[in-house]
Image (cartoon, helix red, strand yellow):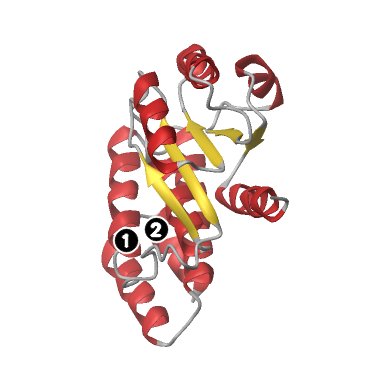
Amino acid sequence: MYEEISKALAELEEDLLLDGVKNLYEKGVPVFDILAALQKGMEEVGKKFEAKDYFLSELIMSADVFKEATGLLGDAFANNDSETLGTVVMGTVKEDIHDIGKDIVVTILKCNGFNVIDLGVDVPYEKFVEAIKEHNPQIIGLSCLLTSAFDNMKGTIVAIEEAGLREGRTILIGGGPTDEKVKDYVRADGVCKNAQEAVETCKKIVGGN
């Protein structure tokens, strides 16, 4: 059934996907397992997009279907402050409006017990600064899909530093074009290539506090 869900999402078969997700959820299958199958499907969509088998319209549709599917998982993502592992402030940086990868990471972090403050896309430097002041996160996540946004990713981190808010916090970056070289360029603490890696990294960070 997991493979059927992944395949249905990859092929944008909305009805088949939603029926499958609902069936697994009602049977008591762990939400994280369902999300793992959905994430695999989204990875296949990404490959199809890179291979030019899919275009922007299919990419947008896949994100909408993914959100609809996770919406069937009840209150599994409701944050309970008394039980959260930690707080993460996350957003797609200024001048980048891509949210698919970010939304997957946000969803899976919430499922794993994190309180996630999602700032959305095209987030100005000052909005990150304000959110950090308000929510006092242990972790800050910066996402981008455009290489042209690297400078804004770096600018965001500089703004956080100039506001005196970096000490005691970990800044992670993610998104298709990010790697260790980009991490060093923008002066982040780490880079996560997928949602599972993001969860594992965040758990290690809060576990070490």
Whether pointer 1 and pointer 2 mark residues with C-beta atoms closer than 8 Å, the reply is yes
Image check: 199 left or right of 135?
Answer: right
Q: Is residue 51 visible?
A: no
Please give the name of the residue rendered at 52% of the width and 36% of the height, measured from the top-left corner: 140
Q: Position of residue 72 (x, y in %)?
A: 30, 70
The amino acid marked with disc number 2 is Leu
The mark found on residue 105 in the picture is: none
The part of the image, by quadrant, that contains residue 102 is top left
Secondary structure found at label 1: loop
Residue 11, given in percent of the width and then of the height, sits at 39, 55
| 176 up-or-down from 9: above or below | above
* Mark 2 lies on residue: 9
Distance (Cα) linking label 1 and label 2: 6 Å
Viewer-side residue, 68 vs 123: 123
Secondary structure found at label 2? helix
Q: Residue at x 35, y 34 (%)?
A: 55
Q: Is residue 105 left or right of residue 202?
A: left
Inspect the image, locate mark 1, and give the three-letter code of the amino acid beneath it.
Glu
Pointer 1 residue: 13
From the top left corner, tell me how far across and down residue 21 is, in percent.
37, 73
Which of the pair 102/136 is nearer the observer? 136
**Could you say which is closer to the camera, residue 161 or residue 192?**
161
146 shown above or below 199: above
Q: Residue at x 70, y 52 (%)?
A: 204
Residue 133, position as x, y percentages in the image: 42, 33
Decide which of 133, 151 is in the foreground and name it: 133
Q: Quadrant of residue 166?
A: top right
Task: Say if residue 132 shows up in the picture.
Answer: yes
- At a point 39% along the width and 58% down the height, the residue shown is 9
Q: Quadrant of residue 90?
A: top left
